[in-house]
Amino acid sequence: MFKHMAMWTWPDAVLGETAEQIVERLRAAHIDIVIPYLGLRDDPAPRAAYEERLQALVEEAHRHGMTVIACFDEMGTYASMPAKDYCQVRQDGEPQNLLCPAHPGAREYLLGELERVLGEFAFDGVNLEDSYVYNSTTIYDPAHSGGAEFSVIPVCYCDHCRAHAPLEQPEWNQWRRDRLSELVAAESRLVHERGLSFSVAARMPYARDDFYAAYQDEIPYYSGWQHCQARDGLAADWLSWLQQGIIDFACPMSYFHSSRLVELETLECQYRVPEARESIWMGLGLDVITAEYAQAHRDHPEPGKVHQDAFKNDAAAIGRQLDLQVRLGQQHVVFFSHAFLRDEHIPVMAAYR
Ligand SMILES: [Zn+2]
């Protein structure tokens, strides 16, 4: 029923299983696209050793007619990263763990790395990892945080931004959006000129505005969504990237156990994107990767119930969410991630493609 089903595959899975094991399990689930992370950092394994296993995965997947899309995750900084000094900086001078999209040094480095991996691997496409944002220390993101207090610690105050950005002015968010969009567009050109697909993992909600107002009583995280919304909170305007053809499709990360929350986020995408059924690939969380499971303590309406098995996306929950996506007319889905693919999920997924 789906044209494509895809699986994000973290480095731990690439390191923990052979290429044959990964491909065999994905094929059993009728998943036809694997999206391995490039894992360019020397952690959890030396880069050369990791890339050797990645090459084997690309070859094995292609041998079975699968598509391989690279998850380009080079944006988060690490000790051996040559460009790590071009990172986002807080007002108090504290360096953050993401590169600054506005910094020419960061952009040159990222584009160089993207060219290198496109030359060395036979990828069929590139998917940007979810780190292409500002304000990564925005506290409160049901897909990513552990339930800290709601707040935003704004960036970027790096030397480049101090010299060029309208810091703290009303136009600052638009300026950051434009710089990030320019970077993504430059990466898009490198990918598209090779005839490959280009896509992104997208933060949700896109915007906590008119669409959700009618449903706010149904959303336990509604006040927190003010901070983690993609366009206005994180300066990541993935809708404009779609509209301008910079990306071919977007993969909103809707990692909830509640099918109703996945439904509302899917409906937000359909509300904003005319071709959402084709160009929006909803990202569904497997097993413990649900906001309700991961979200601790302060913000869950029933704090005593976090970290309970009832919030894991088991086979029955995934079946409900796939039924929902079919009912809404969506043509593609992507799962997060291979490390959380349980044997019980496999026959359920296989029935949908
Ligand atoms: Zn900066």
Image: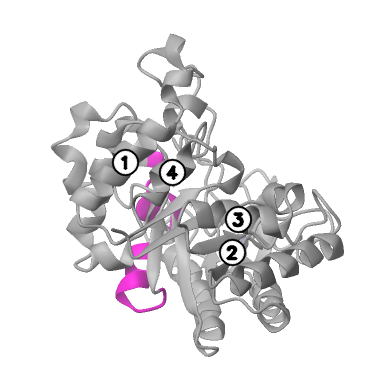
The span from disc 1 to disc 2 (Cα, nearest Å) is 42 Å
Within 10 Å of the Cα at label 4, are there few (<14), some (14-19), or many (20+) other Cα atoms?
A: some
User: Is disc 2's CB within 8 Å of ligand 1?
Assistant: yes
The span from disc 1 to disc 3 (Cα, nearest Å) is 24 Å
Colouring rule applied to residues: one colour
Q: Earlier in the sequence, mark 4 or mark 3?
A: 3
Q: Position of residue 270 (x, y in %)?
A: 21, 57
The span from disc 1 to disc 4 (Cα, nearest Å) is 15 Å
Q: Dot 1: what SS?
A: helix
First to last magenta residue range: 227-247
Left or right of 30: which side holds 36?
right
| Ligand 1 falls in quadrant | bottom right
Q: Position of residue 6 (x, y in %)?
A: 47, 58
Residue under pointer 1: 321
Residue found farthest to the top: 304
| 234 inside magenta stretch | yes
Q: Which mark is on residue 154?
A: none
Q: Which mark is on residue 24?
A: 3
Q: Earlier in the sequence, mark 3 or mark 2?
A: 3
Q: Dot 2: what SS?
A: helix
Which amino acid is tagged 2? Cys
Residue under pointer 2: 161
Which amino acid is tagged 4? Pro
Residue under pointer 4: 347
The span from disc 3 to disc 2 (Cα, nearest Å) is 48 Å
